[in-house]
Image (cartoon, coloured by chain):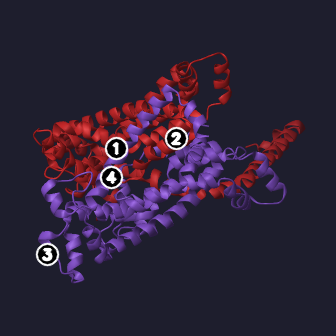
Chain colours: A purple, B red
Amino acid sequence: MTAVQRKKLTLFELIVHTFFIGLSVCILVPLLLLVSISISDEKSLNTLGYRLIPAKYSFKAYDLILQAPKQLLDAYGVTVTVTCIGAIIGLFMTSLLAYTMSRKDYALRNVTMRYVVVTMLFSGGLVPFYILVTQYLHLKDTIWALIVPYLISPFYTLVMKGFMDQVPMETIESAKIDGAGEWRTFMTIILPLVKPALATVGLFICFIYWNDWWLGLLFIDNPKLVPLQLLLYRVLSTIDFLTNGMAQVNVDIDLSTFPSLSARMALTVLAAGPMLFVFPFFQKYFVKGLTIGAVKG
Amino acid sequence: MKTEGDEMNAPAIAEKVNAVQKRGSRTRTVWKVMKKNLPLFSMSLPGILFKMIFSYLPLFGLILAFKHFRVDKGIWGSDWAGFQNFQFLFRSNNAWIITRNTVLYNGAFIVITMIVAITLAVLLNELSSRWMKVHQTILFIPYFISWVVIGYIVQAFLDHQHGFVNQVLTALGLESVKWYQEARFWPYILTAAQLWKTVGFSTLIYYAGIIGIDPTYYEAAKIDGASRWKMTTQITLPLLTPLIVILFIVALGNIFRADFGLFYFVPNDSSFLYPVTDVIDTYVYRSLKVMGDIGMSTAVGLYQSLIGFVLVITANFIIRKINREHSLW
């Protein structure tokens, strides 16, 4: 098997492979550096600087963060809640909207389509959005401020619509003949048929919520509602948060040996890590989901 | 005065009755169409309402660009300012700097990402599927990392004291650089960061477009003895053009909207770098959060939307002239 494949590898393919391996290294090295700093000894960081392979290993940074994990856990709680609720509601609303745009016998199909595409091109900008959320919807400092604004993205709606276009009209018609109403058809026939699209778009929505700091930056002052990425951003400019956390639980630490450099990176790894582990499991759906979507018509 | 009925003869009356009946049946068909489409409309309603509130309603807020906004008076009650907010913006140097930065960066990103992503997608397509998946997965990883985290990574590289790059520079006997104070490097750093994060995603979109191409074209070309290069230039690229054009138009419409995360977190909001890293979006954010200048921030937002609108219309018009099939509408 391998012998056959090796024979097939032409010079051209070899060059392409080498090129992609080089590219992969360029992509992975920055991530490796991040992890490596987080598991380096603080002293060696201070004297030798950041290195790709730690001069001296130390897991003290993780130890310290996990000793006083309250703020991190709070932030995790907020982000996980926002991601779950947002993904479920967002996915449902997106697939409903996309479904109506994919139904060729729906009179308002093109109108709906245009209505959605226009929102991709024009927006009121930051200020009207800010005033809308704070003055009219009164969402400031609530968890909904982190969820509601991202529920439907026009781009993902089009991806979903592209996928649903593939569902043959006969399937829908036969469901109708069997006496199913539109809602019933959608819930019991369409949704199970487009599972790969749901997985793709669902994961995209998850990442949007997981990686968001923007809504937090704009609307969240309450420390209990700070999402993970915003916490990271705040720690980037100050390490106080960690030392404060320590003081509260009476962890005896000498601030001069406090691993502030590695602790920041450790926190980053803890914040970004989980989603990167989830991602490869969904990889196979991506191309499938995107192939059919994102293209006009 | 004569009433209408007096003058009417029989055929006229019959016609009228007919018309009324017709109108009746028309309303009946309208009703029928409505009834038929109502369930589907009810399904799109959550989305329609959402877009109405979050995308269309804020457009009215653009009126603030012409007002002296006061929270206690509200949007409609605040006094008119005419074009004062715009004057204030355009008289300062800032308008020129942030516009130039935004357009140049986004223009460069559009062109570079497009070229690199299409090249990568074409190359990916040449690989056997097993390897293609490995490379694709790795390429795609950075897309899922937030700008905050990327800000940390860039710091790990460029930190003056500890940074990886300065380690390498001193090891090579070169002077270390205070990266966060040297404006001249940042156009390249930001472009590299942008490419690192987004190229995998764009590649995937184009790749998806390529594998959507009917394989019979390639089979026919193979029988005719076409080379890889010939197939790429004669089949892949022409058939990919509609997708490229659509993505280009959409990108062009957003050329005045910069990626806030990239320009805020990656340079770590360093004021030394504002001349080359400040874009419209970071400027609006700062003038809103730091100075609380609502009128001018909205004016900038309107400016963004208007130019984007003009650009999209123009691009679409030009593309329509060249090839009607490829235009957005």
State the image coordinates of residue B210 (x, y, percent, origin top left).
56, 33
The amino acid marked with disc number 3 is Asp
Q: Would you name the residue on which mark 4 appears? A: A32
The outermost residue toward the bottom is: A250
Estimate the spatial distance between the alpha carbons at disc 3 and disc 2, rounded to whole Å.
50 Å
- The residue mark sitting in front, 1 or 4, is 4
Mark 4–mark 2 CB contact (< 8 Å): no
SS of the residue at dot 4? Answer: helix
- Residue A254 tag number: 3
Q: Is residue A25 above or below residue A270?
A: above
In front: B85, or B206? Answer: B206
Q: Which residue is mark 2?
A: B131
Q: Quadrant of the N terminus of chain A?
A: top right
Image spot of residue B126 (x, y percent): 54, 31
The reply to whether the C-beta atoms of the residues labelled 1 and 2 are less than 8 Å apart is: no
Depth check, front residue: A221 or B214: B214
Query: Residue at left 36%, top 74%?
Result: A74
Q: Amino acid at mark 1?
A: Leu
Chain letter for mark 3, please.
A
Q: Dot 1 corresponds to which residue?
A: B302
What residue sits 71% from the left and 52% below the top?
A: B37
How far is the residue under mark 4 from the one under mark 2? 22 Å
